[in-house]
Amino acid sequence: MGKVKKTKATATGNTQALPFNTDRGQHILKNPGIVNAIIEKSAIKPTDTVLEVGPGTGNLSVKILEKAKKLIACEIDPRMVAELNKRVMGTSVQSKLEIRPGDVMDSEWPIFDVCVANLPYQISSPFVFKLLLQRPLPRYAVLMFQKEFADRLLAKPGDKFYCRLSVNVQLLSRVEHLMKVKRTEFRPPPKVDSAVVRIQPKNPPPPINYAEWDGLLRLVFLRKNKTLLAIFHQTQIIELLEKNYRALVTSQKKDVPANFNMKELIEETLTNSGFANKRSRTMAVEDFLRLLLEFNKADLMKQLIVKMVLKLDTERVDPGVIVKAEQHDSDAFHIEYSAYSAI
């Protein structure tokens, strides 16, 4: 998808030609039946303020406006802003629409109850985590994603698409598949099919240290098919953990025990907790939470794994491992958005 293609603007009455920029993910949903199905599954209340991202020419927007108290539409393309304004001008719902021009990922979000959006595919992952770190939390979001991305959100332990993204999203929310949407239902058509999912944030969110959680997952998903013991037995990981441990103890003006052995400590922790032969690809969210607890009991988490993973990311200690990690970057919990949390 890299070219700007010219097509008719919508399938709902506007016949004026408008060029769509597929680089910005402008694929307009043209089937009114699917639009209506999304609105129905969104279950918008008359008292709701709804956030829509990338409204385009407004096919979803006008239906949301019929249901909601207010619609806040975020649109980066000035041409689409003008198109949406023109579409509601003089109608009974005009006063219910607030358009916010600009990049939704660079702006502060308003308070809203529900999010309904046909998202540009390229912002899917960062958008989901900004949504889940929004405060106050919305009731839920009904979002259109590329099908493979939706499959990763929904994947269960042992599934082909199960990854770090799956674990993180399911830690913070309940995810439900609502419907499939064929690529031919868009204008211009994207290269892949889509899926609509409902994401319902857990409120309150789990009371854990998210920096520690993210550091642990980054490490164990470097090689999700290996046992945890095999991952932690890598020389580079042992050396970095020990180096960080010694630095931490020194900073606290304490002495490192003469018989201290990082490898033995990790092995003992994994074996005694029953995790030594577990593999990340088969572990549920509850398993990772218990693993985090066991590492904290052994005093292995406090700044150790987080620092080690950051060091792995920057120093490229094991090229084979790091290349693999980079290939799965789209699966990651993007800790860059920690500014939106309490980290």
Image: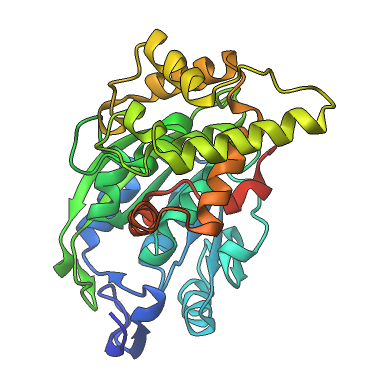
Q: Residue 157 at what x, y percent from top left? A: 25, 29
Residue lying farthest top?
272
Which of the 4 image quadrants contains residue 326?
Answer: bottom left
Residue positioned 23% across, 54% down in the render: 147
Which of the 4 image quadrants contains residue 210?
Answer: top right
What colour scheme does the image use?
rainbow
Looking at the picture, tell me which residue is in the foreground, 267 or 219: 267
Q: Residue 178 at what x, y percent from top left? A: 25, 41
Q: Residue 188 at what x, y percent from top left? A: 24, 78
Residue positioned 49% across, 71% down in the render: 88
Residue positioned 20% across, 57% down in the render: 33
220 sits left or right of 81 in the view: left
Instruction: Classify 173 as above or below 98.
Output: above
Looking at the picture, tell me which residue is in the foreground, 317 or 227: 317
Residue positioned 19% across, 71% down in the render: 191
Instruction: Classify 23 as above or below 327.
Output: below
The quarter of the image holding the C terminus is top right
Looking at the picture, tell me which residue is in the foreground, 254 or 327: 254
Instruction: Classify 29 as above or below 338.
Output: below
Which of the 4 image quadrants contains residue 222?
Answer: top left
Residue lying farthest right?
253
Instruction: Classify 207 as above or below 127.
Output: above
